[in-house]
Image (cartoon, rainbow, N blue to C red):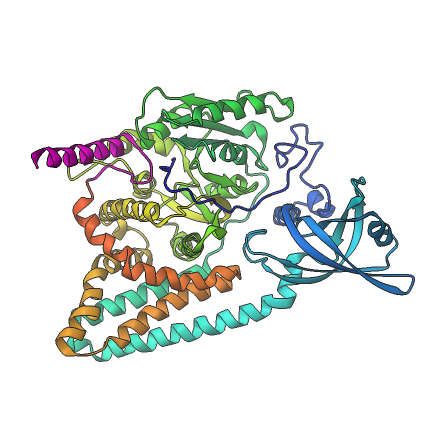
Amino acid sequence: MGKEKQKEVEDILLERSSDRRILNYVPAKDGVRTNVDRRQDEDAGESEDFEKLENSIYEGIRYAVDYPVTVTYRSKGRKRTFQAKAVNISGSGIQLKLFKEDGEHLNEADDIQLKFEILPGTMPEGYEMPVNIHAEVTQNFAELNGYVRCGLHFKESLAEYSNRHRGRYMFMVSVFWLFTVSLVVILMRSESVLYFQFNKVLYLYSIITAIFLLSRYAFALFYKPVPIDPKFTPGVTILIPCFNEEKWIQRTIMGCLNQNYPMDKLEVIVIDDCSTDGSQQKIVEIVEKLKADPRYHVEGRLKYILRPENTGKREVLAAGVLEAKHELVVFVDSDSFLEPFAIVNLVQPFRDEEMGGVSGRTDIANTYTNTLTKMQAVRYYIAFRVMKAAEGFFDAATCLSGPLSCYKKSLVLENLDAWRGQKFLGQRATFGDDRSLTNFILRKHRTTYQDTAVCNTIVPNTYSVFLRQQMRWKRSWLRESLIAAKFMWKKEPFMALSFYMGLVVPLAAPLVVIYNLIWVPLAHRVFPTAFLVGMLMMALMMSFAQLLLRRSTTWIYGIWFCIYYEFVLLWQMPVAWVTFWKSTWGTRMTPADVAEEEAKKNKKLSKREAQ
């Protein structure tokens, strides 16, 4: 749902080059056109190897850039060098802007070598690196003002280049440090066993924390996403709840429609919850634009609902579910953008008839905006690829995340009234809809995680909005975790044990930190070296896992996140204990938020009048 406008910070997003077709990944209804075009591997389109096709298409996605490129070529035994500018790049090739005469020489070249640097934020994470690669001319474009554009195909993909030049090195470094950090943590916890008799509560907590974290990383190693069966394409209705999201809603709608999925089996419904900005106009505008192009058969499979009053996200989603015509319903937040193979990957676990819900992976769209967003990028990736993957290994994901999740429609309808009217200790639950619905489904069915189903979401880029978001999440986590505790013992024993450990660790963490960082130094005159080293080890584990799995330069921000968590975010937990009943979102002006702001103003006014 939408976020309240705060102090404006311009987000930095990947800029994909425009395509001639608005929905360029949608397969043609008549089957004539496939998703193999431009420089992609033609063999991939003819085979049943869907993973090869998927990789081929992602490799061909072009990003708008502005790099200086040094071009060195050999022609008729002579070596020449000149400067050019890159205007777009993909994993398989690059387009250069250069002088006309330089372009003519390239056409006759026997060997071409390109030297440039991929800057962070201009291609997906993991590609940022200096490049010195061989290429060949594939296409020349029309002359303009003395310049020409020239398309070149890399003789090896950037993924292959990265793996050959730095991939193995980064793999070995990250594995070595992960092993070292894990060994240090185990040795430190062995010490806790030895000293257990002197402080049973404290050392038991440290042992539980270590077991919980190490086991999550261990189980994540064994996790594997369900592979794609191209013949399994059940009917899907995507629901997009919207409130005050005029900036991103059109991009979200486009991403949901632009899927490599049969058109007759994909429906998109946008439900606007009486937005007070320009969201409704943006929704109508993009729907009418898409309907005007008959190639996409939008009529009948893309619709919008403009609600006359604000009723909250649960009511909006419930209205969408009741309108959905397909057997699976997918929830997508209005500031989240699906990758073109997200849906076909997301539905695969439903080949298991006992599967009730599936969560996709959420990456950060605005990673390179500032330090805060980079920190969140690491946190999100580890939360999904490690923590949620470990739960997915046991088919017991405890939160099917709002940015991208899928449910059997019949199960949602079965629990719809209870979910819409949920109360906790007499208070109506107005947020945490994803965790709440997951609990309803998880009670009797399986829920899992599909790492290959990817969406990108916009995260807060200011600390004030971020802190309010985190407070809301902690309140919903506390409420729904206590509810889940009533039935999780019935699940797979290892998963159940891990869940209860994961409940105890954050709840008790504030008391443990106070004891170690304040009480021990003041009462016993002992510097908390062991505790601080333990914190550092946990931070390093997150960062090196990011380096191993993603090979991104953002890995260092995992350390910063852990420090920020211990000294800032952790102290939101006690507040959440005593304010779980609050219905405000904090990150967008819902009616509850407006009422609270009005109450604060009236209170201040009353104080002034009393004076």
Q: Position of residue 257 (x, y in %)?
A: 54, 32
Q: Residue furthest front?
A: 611
State which quadrant residue 378 falls in.
bottom left
Q: Position of residue 434 (x, y in %)?
A: 34, 40
Q: Position of residue 228 (x, y in %)?
A: 56, 45
Residue 392 part of the magenta segment: no
| Quarter placement of the C terminus | top left
Name the magenta segment's main secondary structure.
helix
Depth order, front residue of 535/346: 535
Residue 298 appearing in the image: no
195 vs 49: above or below: below
* Region in magenta: 582-611
State which quadrant residue 6 falls in.
top left
Identify the residue shown where x is 16% and y is 77%: 197
Residue 64 appearing in the image: yes
Left or right relative to 145: residue 383: left
